Image: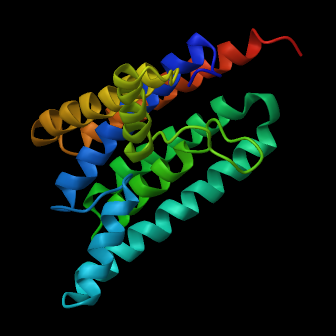
Amino acid sequence: MIRFAPSLRALAVCLAFLAGYVDALGFLATSGFFVSFMSGNSTRLAVGLAGARAEAVAAGTLILCFVAGVILGAVVGTKAGRRQSAAVLLLVALLLGCAAAAGSWPGLWTPGLLAIAMGAENAVFEREGEAPLGLTYMTGSLVRLGFGLSGLLTGRRHPGWTGYALLWVGLVAGALAGASLFPMLRQDAMLLASGGACALAAWAWIAAARVPS
């Protein structure tokens, strides 16, 4: 986080909020599966293989969708050049809109599209095949937060840990918003997520325009 300009740090926190929001929608829509947190789905896949084949299939499908989203987001971002972040976010917005429209379709269409969107989101800041920030999962951020807090006790500086704390807060706040709105809005809650991704795409577009060529 310390290598990011302040505007990009703020964008990253907003993206974590979006991820938490969408993950809560997917979790509630599927009664316990994740669309952005693939470690949880990997555990559900393993547990399902031990005795609940339908759950294993659902978890495995969402994992494949997430990876497909990462690939799609990386390809779109590469083709977009310096407008990478905006282009990827427009893709995310489109996928979230499709997920809302697929609400009446049977099976895993809606959560699958949500998982593809969350996979794609991780390509917003992609550089040379690396994602410098985990936007849809917080284990790494919590580890860095722990190191930062340990530095307060040992005198060793670990700069940037407050930024990772904000990422975690953003994701939790987004999940709280999603969990609160889904019972009232159902599929329309996904349209709100799509609109939010569009707004973030506009922000990223303007930010890229201000960077000298």
Residue 183 quadrant: top left
Task: Report x, y in % for residue 127.
Answer: 73, 41
Residue 190 quadrant: top left
Quadrant containing the N terminus is: top right
In the image, 105 versus 2, the foreground residue is 2
Task: Report x, y in % for residue 122.
Answer: 55, 44
In the image, 200 versus 103, the foreground residue is 200
Vertically, is 28 above or below 140? below
Query: Which residue reaches farthest left?
Result: 183
Q: Residue 147: in sight, yes or no?
A: yes
Which residue does the image show at 49% across and 21% down from the upper left? 199
Q: How many marks?
A: 0
Residue 213 quadrant: top right
Task: Report x, y in % for residue 64.
Answer: 49, 70
Task: Report x, y in % for residue 88.
Answer: 62, 39
Q: Is residue 45 left or right of residue 4?
A: left
